[in-house]
Amino acid sequence: MKTAITIATLLFVVAALGCESPRGGGISGGEGFKIGTPVLDTKITQGETVSVTISLNRGENFKRDVTLDIRASKGISVEPTQAVVKGNEKPDVALRITAAKDANLGEYKVFVKGTPATGEATSTEITVKVVAP
């Protein structure tokens, strides 16, 4: 029983923390940023739209604007396809992911690339599983 509780707690912590991209931005740790995405796969039924939040996790000294370019693999769509997160704005961006009514069942990807006003870009992806209604 203790093992089951420990595993459940660990899964909750991992899900709450999410998954992050490699660091982009400046050279030192406080000058960079990462893109945080849900750690668990996003499930969606054919013809459905779900909302997913991605976050820009900035280092303490990173105050630059970041342009996010977002695209999805064929069979699903994502909106918006571009967003600019200003250096002084809330770092969360809500995405709407839609599976076509005739989308094949299986895994798809949403690709997110973050490019700062100056410095190195970084990218990450979200796995989307399309399931039957």
Image (cartoon, rainbow, N blue to C red):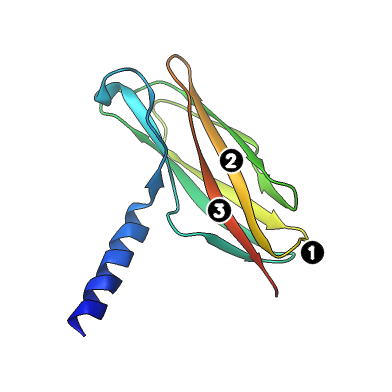
Which of 35 and 85 lies nearest the eye of the viewer? 35
Q: Which three-letter amino acid code belongs to the residue tagged 2? A: Phe
Quarter holding the N terminus is bottom left
Question: Mark 3 and mark 2: span between their CA atoms?
Answer: 9 Å
The residue singled out by tag 3 in the image is: 127
Residue 56 appears in the picture as rendered: yes
Q: Residue at x 26, y 20 (%)?
A: 28
* x, y percent for residue 24: 40, 26
Give me the C-alpha separation between circle 2 and circle 1: 21 Å
Amino acid identity at mark 1: Lys
Whether tag 3 and tag 2 are in contact, CB under 8 A, the answer is no
Q: Please tell me how crowded label 2 is: few (under 14), some (14-19), or many (20+) other residues with Cα within 10 Å.
A: some
List x then y, in percent, for residue 46.
72, 66
Q: Residue at x 37, y 30 (%)?
A: 23
Mark 3 or 1, which is nearer the eye?
A: 3
Disc sitting over residue 64 in the figure? none
Lower position in the chain sequence, tag 3 or tag 1: 1
Q: Position of residue 95 (x, y in %)?
A: 58, 48
Q: In the displayed image of the protein, which residue is found farthest to the left? A: 2
Residue linked to disc 1: 101
Quadrant in which residue 59 is drawn: top left
- What residue is pinned by disc 2? 111
Label 1 element class: loop
- Looking at the image, the residue that sits furthest to the bottom is 1
Amino acid at dot 3 = Thr
Quadrant in which residue 49 is drawn: bottom right
Q: Callout 1: 10 Å neighbours few (<14), some, many (20+)?
A: some
